[in-house]
Amino acid sequence: MQPDPKRPTGLAALRARAAAARARGASRAADDRAHRLLDAYLATAEAHGRPAREVIADMARGETAWQIALALRDQALAQPPAIVQNAACAEGCAFCCILEGGDGGTITEAEATRLHTALAPLAGQPDGRAWHSDACPALDPATRRCRAYDARPMICRSFLSTDAAACEANAAGGTAGGAGLLGTHVDYLAVHALIRETLKGTARVATYSLARTAAAAIDGTGLAESLDAARQPPKALETACRDLTRAGAGKPAARV
Ligand code: SF4
Ligand code: SF4
């Protein structure tokens, strides 16, 4: 009997359901790549005999997309493209950590949890907002270094620029070029969006605001309450995918 793709009970059924799903907001090309990447991940999990319940939990939390994106990023950086070779990024250069609009970008539950865990011990200390009102609370206001560097989300690991002066101008509302996200970030979001559709009715796949997660941790709010406060509306992931895909067609997003 063929597995019912609407009720994944094992990894074969999950693969069938993923094949029939669509990464909302992603371009056709990004959706195609997300399908290939997720299917390869699930095939490997199946070959290793991983329990479906464990795999579904990793998918829902964002660990699956994280592992896929890290592998892609390592591949991309093994032969760095020009934007990486010419990057102006340096420690203490933090104009990209000034987060317009109070949201700061879309992160997964796994990223939000890691960020909160790294920042919670710093609760009550002066944070990035003492330097700039829109800065990420994870920032040290004196040194402008990220105080959650090892736990920083993928969006922070993917952003770079060839022109720090342009970043400073953009942080003040400018539209200078030279900055962008590695193309692997498109794949990261598209895989997570595909996972959300794959797990619909099986597990919740939420996303969170980077800035609100960091602020809640620094304010001393516990993890569960912080996640509640930082949870984004359901459309946020789709919108992030769409915006990034559009930006990728020109500037500032950089494809690797
Ligand atoms: S992206 Fe811009 S602001 Fe951020 S570290 Fe690189 S040059 Fe500096
Ligand atoms: S988590 Fe760290 S790298 Fe990311 S925006 Fe905040 S301060 Fe910057």
Image (spheres, grey):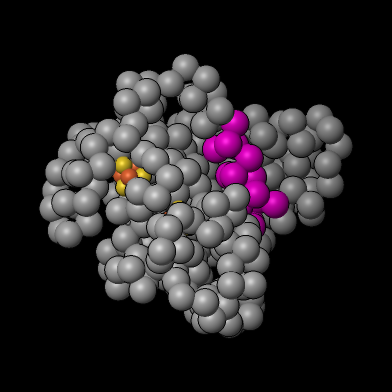
Percent coordinates x, y for residue 221 in the rendering: 58, 82
Would you place residue 100 above or below residue 123 in this image? above
Percent coordinates x, y for residue 92 in the rendering: 40, 50
Which quarter of the image is occupied by the C terminus?
top left
Is 69 positioned to the left or the right of 145 in the image? right
Would you place residue 153 above or below residue 136 in this image? above
Ligand number 2: quarter of image: bottom left
Snapshot quadrant of residue 43 = top right
In the image, which residues are magenta? Answer: 58-71
Q: Nearer the viewer, residue 117 or 183?
A: 117
Q: Nearer the viewer, residue 99 or 224?
A: 99
Q: Residue at x 57, y 78 (%)?
A: 123
Reply yes or no: does residue 185 show up in magenta: no
Q: Nearer the viewer, residue 91 or 8?
A: 91
Q: Residue at x 30, y 73 (%)?
A: 133
Q: Residue furthest top?
A: 79
Q: Residue furthest front?
A: 142
Q: Nearer the viewer, residue 31 or 210?
A: 210
- What secondary structure prevails in the magenta region? helix
